[in-house]
């Protein structure tokens, strides 16, 4: 259950990602010289915004070579890398960004594995900045969730028209995923999805205990 790498390569030139950076959080909690990892960076949009805010010591990684290729073309000068798994030393980063990545990972096991890896990569006291999709309340999404639970066995998992299997999350699921971290900031925001639909997203800033 989940998305293949072929899908993200296929749509690398077509999708627009929109989850915004909350600049006030960054200036409040993150030093300008912080070592930052944007995990699942896509074409580097968020990393580009980070550098624009003065956070130059940052790297973006993604499994899709064509997303990275697009990012290098649109944002030359960014440190964008293709990876399969995080081949990075543990306790390397002061901040890890995880923007609209969990929505692309349908299974509990894969999500938990990723959060454990990111915990490992953070220095004690380091921050994880998550932006992702909670369960939506509109009729269109509720219908997709009901169809998806019959097919995939998890409420909130659904397939969209172009073949991606995506996931929206209950609040208690986010709490379970982030149980090893200490809460710092939380906000609900309004966004436009990569397919152009209005939606509510949640952003959470959490800390690896020192």
Image (cartoon, rainbow, N blue to C red):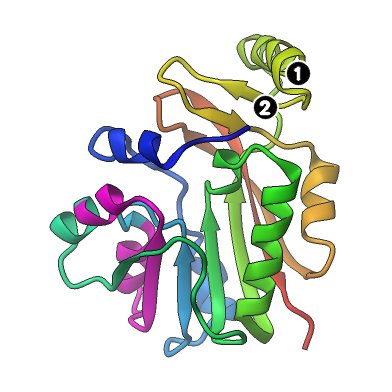
Q: Which residue is at 38% across, 77% downward?
A: 58
Task: Confirm or deny contact between disc 2 and disc 1 (CB under 8 A).
Answer: yes
Specify the label residue 183 is tagged with: none
Closest to the observer, 183 or 57 = 57
Residue at the spot x=72%, y=37% of the render? 169
Query: Would you call the spot at circle 2 few (<14 residues within 10 Å), some (14-19), or many (20 or more)?
Result: many
Position in image of residue 32 (x %, y %)? 43, 86
Residue 153 lies left or right of residue 7; in this view the side is: right
Q: Quadrant of residue 142?
A: top right
| Distance CA(mark 2)–CA(mark 1) | 7 Å
Is 108 on the left or on the right of 23, as rendered? right
When the figure is inspected, residue 148 is found, relative to residue 21, above or below; the finding is: above
Task: Find residue 83 and report its horizontal and vertical position in percent.
Answer: 41, 64
Question: Which quadrant is home to the C terminus?
Answer: bottom right
Q: Where is residue 57 in the image (x, y as percent from the top left)?
A: 37, 84
| Res 179 quadrant in image | bottom right
Residue underneath mark 1: 149
User: Circle 1: is it few (<14), some (14-19), or many (20+) Cα within 10 Å?
Assistant: some
Horizontally, residue 101 falls left or right of residue 203, namely left
**Was residue 176 drawn as part of the magenta stretch in this picture?**
no
Residues in magenta? 46-69
- Residue name at image x 54 percent, y 48 percent: 101
Name the residue tied to disc 2. 157
């Amino acid at each position: 259950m989940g998305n293949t790498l072929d899908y993200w390569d296929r749509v690398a030139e077509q999708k627009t990602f929109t989850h915004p950076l909350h600049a006030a959080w960054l200036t409040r909690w993150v030093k300008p010289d912080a070592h930052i990892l944007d995990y699942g960076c896509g074409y580097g949009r968020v990393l580009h915004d980070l550098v624009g805010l003065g956070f130059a010591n940052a790297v973006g990684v993604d499994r899709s070579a064509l997303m990275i290729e697009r990012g290098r073309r649109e944002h030359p000068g960014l440190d964008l890398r293709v990876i399969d798994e995080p081949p990075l030393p543990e306790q390397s980063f002061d901040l890890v960004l995880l923007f609209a990545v969990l929505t692309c990972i349908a299974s509990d096991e894969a999500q938990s594995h990723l959060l454990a890896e990111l915990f490992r990569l953070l220095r004690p006291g380091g921050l994880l900045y998550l932006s992702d999709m909670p369960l939506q309340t509109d009729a269109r999404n509720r219908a997709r969730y009901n169809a998806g639970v019959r097919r995939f066995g998890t409420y909130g998992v659904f397939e969209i028209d172009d073949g991606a299997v995506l996931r929206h999350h209950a609040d208690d699921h986010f709490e379970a995923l982030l149980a090893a971290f200490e809460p710092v900031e939380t906000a609900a925001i309004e966004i436009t999805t990569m397919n152009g639909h209005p939606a509510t997203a949640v952003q959470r800033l959490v800390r690896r205990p020192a």
